[in-house]
Amino acid sequence: MSPALLEVTDLRHSYQTRQGEHTVLDGLTFSVERGEFVSIVGPSGCGKTTLLRSLSGLLRPSGGTVALGGTVIDGVPQGLAMVFQDYRGSLFPWRRVGENVEFPLLGSVPKSERRRRTEESLEAVGLAAAADRYPWQLSGGMQQRVAIARALAMRPELLLMDEPFASVDAQTRSDLEDLLLRVREQFDMTILFVTHDVDESVYLSTRVLSLSKAPTVQTADVTVPLAFPRDQITTREEGAFVTTRSEVARLIRQAGPGGLAA
Ligand SMILES: Nc1ncnc2c1ncn2[C@@H]1O[C@H](COP(=O)(O)OP(=O)(O)OP(=O)(O)O)[C@@H](O)[C@H]1O
């Protein structure tokens, strides 16, 4: 049997603070198979961002292992891209949209291939015509599409997303959710997605992992029994959507004070 795309084993992390050691992740174990869309939910402060930062190599965890395709990673792994909530902070304002998308490929991908990937990625997010504009000339939703295009240009096997749609209005958020489901299909990506929004987690995912409050020691694992393609109106009306949503909301609430409202 081939190894899972992502294998997280006994992951631990403690921050050193003035008050002493603050343990956030206390032995987290889960895996993600190729082709899955897994959302991570949990009470505020339970360590969702700490988890993604550990997976992406931005933070060295205090203990445990992370393996990608069966290889234990140390540092910034290949084959992985990350999209953050704060698109303003993640795009270079002085570079044009096309240059932003191309940027992570500089030095590792030949120029003609960079051009091709940039055009294809911008096309996929509906921004082919915006390549020569600057990020600040675009709306928030469009800037987040640029951030997604930049991730696509890297051709990641695994895309990590940290509350990517939390800073846009509700209509833009629905549009971005559907765009994400389309590009996931087109680029054959596996996605690990952190969100505060229970409905969003169920709408997008094949599986939802609910973390306990920090120190996070356990997860509940909920399979989403909904077919693709999904539809913002009809999928949300399905009985399976409603019951899964309630199950996830209950798990978050049970995780303790600070849990999200259903
Ligand atoms: N650099 C740091 N130093 C000390 N403590 C930190 C640091 N970064 C995060 N923390 C603390 O670790 C805990 C987990 O933070 P993290 O951002 O991973 O949680 P989260 O689940 O993503 O939170 P939220 O849902 O509010 O975004 C929080 O109590 C936070 O205050």
Image: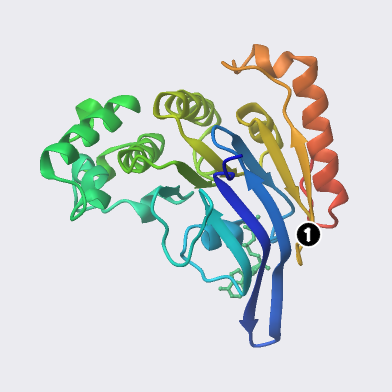
Residue 16 found in image quarter: bottom right
Residue 147 locus on image (x, y percent): 36, 43
Name the image quarter holding the C terminus. top right
Asked which secondary structure carries label 1, the reply is loop
**Furthest residue to the left?**
112
Q: Nearer the viewer, residue 116 or 96?
A: 116
Residue 223 found in image quarter: top right
Q: Quadrant of ligand 1?
A: bottom right
Q: What residue is pinned by disc 1?
A: 213
Q: Is residue 92 left or right of residue 73?
A: left
In the displayed structure, would residue 200 be above or below residue 10?
above
User: What amino acid does circle 1 point to?
Assistant: Lys
Residue 112 can be seen, yes or no: yes
In the displayed structure, would residue 222 be above or below residue 234?
below
Residue 118 locus on image (x, y percent): 23, 36
Residue 204 locus on image (x, y percent): 60, 29
**Furthest residue to the front?**
1
